Image: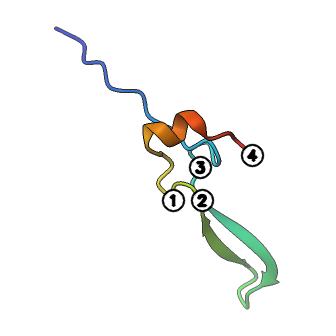
Amino acid sequence: MPQHNHAPSRICPNCSGFAAVAIATGVRLRDGSRATVPVNCQTCDGAGTVARPLATTAKAI
């Protein structure tokens, strides 16, 4: 059977593919858990991948 070769993914150079994170605010809720704020990567808008021209020219911070 032939093997299919998929195009390599274009991972965002700023977030390395981890586009959405939850940052703890330090505030505790009534049940004892921590309050978090969801944050998306500004470069890829939370997708984790970018267009080829941006992936090859942008530098990681």
Identify which residue is drawn at 52% across, 42% down.
54
x and y percent of residue 26 in the render? 83, 77
Q: Counting other residues with Cα less than 10 Å from the Cα at mark 2, is it few (<14), some (14-19), or many (20 or more)? A: some
Q: Residues within 10 Å of mark 3 (few under 14, many from 20)?
A: some
The reply to whether discs 2 and 3 touch (Cβ–Cβ < 8 Å) is yes
Q: Which residue is mark 3?
A: 18
**Spot occupied by residue 7 in the image (x, y as percentages of width and height):** 35, 26
Identify the amino acid type marked 2.
Answer: Cys
Q: Which residue is mark 1?
A: 46
- The secondary structure type at the circle numbered 3 is loop
Separation of marks 3 and 1 at Cα, in angstroms: 8 Å
Residue 42 to residue 26: above or below: above
The numbered dot on residue 61 is 4
In what element is the residue under mark 4?
loop
For residue 31, which quarter of the picture? bottom right
Instruction: State how far apart marks 4 and 3 are (Cα).
Output: 14 Å
- In the picture, the quarter occupied by the N terminus is top left
Question: Mark 2, mark 4: which one is toward the viewer?
Answer: 4
Compute the Cα span from label 1 to label 4.
17 Å
Numbered circle sitting on residue 41 = 2
Q: Is residue 47 above or below residue 34?
A: above
Q: In the shown orientation, is residue 16 left or right of residue 46?
A: right
**Circle count:** 4
Q: In this rendered view, identify the residue nearer to me: 7 or 53.
A: 53
Relative vertical location of residue 55 with respect to residue 48 in this rendering, above or below: above
